[in-house]
Amino acid sequence: MKVVVIGCTHAGTAAVVNIAALYRDAKVTVYERNDNISFLSCGIALNVEGIVKDPATLFYSSPEKLAELGVETRMKHDVVSVNVADKKLRVRNVETGQEFDDTYDKLVVTSGSWPVEPKIENSGLDNILLCKNYGHAQEIIRRTKTAQRIAIVGAGYIGTELAEAFEVQGKSVVLIDQAPQILAKYLDPEMVACPQQLYLDRGIELAFNQTVEAFVDDGRGGVAAVKTDGGEYKADMVVLCVGFRPNTAIFRGQLDMTPNGAIRVDEYMRTSAPDVLAAGDCCAVHNNASGRPEYIPLATNAVRMGTLVARNLKNPTTKHPGAQGTSGIKIYDWNIASTGLTEIVAREMGLDAASSTLRDNYRPEFMPTTSELLLRIVYERGSGRLLGAQLQSKADLTQSINALSVCIQQRMTVEELAFTDFFFQPHYNKPWNFLNSVALKVLPPL
């Protein structure tokens, strides 16, 4: 069995390692356009801040490790076209420009994503950077050494993490977004007051509800400022973090896709073409909260889907259970996590959503210390089905969001959550666990 894998970051690495283990007769060839594999881009901000000293430690595999499994990894080789009807592909050697053809019995598409690059006037100026791969990480680290005023466009996870990292390094930082808040896809407005105040307290400027219109030239080909529809912000370095789009252009017209170009797969990771499977950031995944296929580019989704590709390569054996978009972030000394839909997003989807919010100490006040948590659950009126949850606290309670992720996946109701069996021990919680308490607030009086 000849298996060709396109791309080898998280989903690709998971697929390749498991294919090699499960199918001893498989001849596996990986085509990767970059000069490295398996880079954890979530560590870029940690490297900028100095928590991770060496970015080379952010790799968890290599062509050499894959070779030990019998896998041929061809680095700096870009797949420029695929004919899924004939099971053929054309590959370009990025270094030499030479092109050649290859064939496959099974094709695994793990081509990942690329940062959205909005069409903005003067976007080609020097010191306007992207943040995705190892090359970007090296460039950001290098240029941060001389930059003094840094503008970050996009207040999602990457942008908010970089804002803290640059501020810790003594830089002047402005965080710009079209949304009215940070982490708008993950947290409702009531849940961002504390983290946003942390940024303001440390001198980070927040420029929300603003669209970037142009970058200002410093007269030497570099960036001097960011001009928005709400003002102008001086900057000698800009990092664009406005989202990602799937790397799927070569499959347009051949594979079924969502409107944004994410490949549609079934629960066994099979695409609309025979013998073509896909996983990771190039795909849509079934969202258990919304009940729809959605684009959720997370490393956790990627490794699960890549592993499932391997298990289902020959025959459909193991179903994907769906995802909730569960994620977490640490902002200074606050721990924040979320899963499923925010109340705003749920309503935008047409769901009759409501929420319950709990502010309480996470363990008894008679303990030597305790600290406050803020927890919100989102649910569907009528059915009571859980749709999402958000939590923040100084104590690390983020694993509770993993529990709520399971609740959403299993289509639990608020009433069921209210009386779910959780242990009590004063070191960790109260007799009524806070997950029970936030749900109990929803139950109507008899």
Image (tube, rainbow, N blue to C red):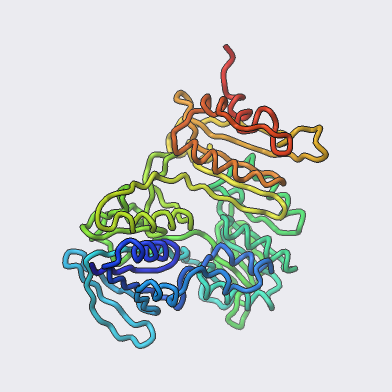
Q: Nearer the viewer, residue 443 or 196?
A: 443
In the picture, which quadrant includes the N terminus? bottom left
Report the side of 357 relative to 394 (left or right).
left
Residue 285 higher or lower than 188, as above or below: below
Q: Quadrant of residue 87?
A: bottom left
Q: Residue at x 60, y 48 (%)?
A: 180
**Residue 336 percent across, percent down from the top left:** 63, 47
In the picture, which quadrant includes the C terminus? top right
**Residue 241 percent across, percent down from the top left:** 54, 62
Residue 50 higher or lower than 442, as above or below: below
Q: Nearer the viewer, residue 128 or 112?
A: 112
Q: Residue at x 33, y 48 (%)?
A: 318
The mark tally for this picture is: 0
Report the side of 312 relative to 235 (left or right).
left
Q: Residue at x 28, y 54 (%)?
A: 270
**Residue 157 percent across, percent down from the top left:** 57, 56
Residue 392 higher or lower than 169, as above or below: above
Report the side of 261 relative to 130 (left or right).
left
Q: Residue furthest left?
A: 86
Q: Quadrant of residue 205?
A: bottom right
**Residue 422 percent across, percent down from the top left:** 60, 32
Q: Residue furthest bottom?
A: 96
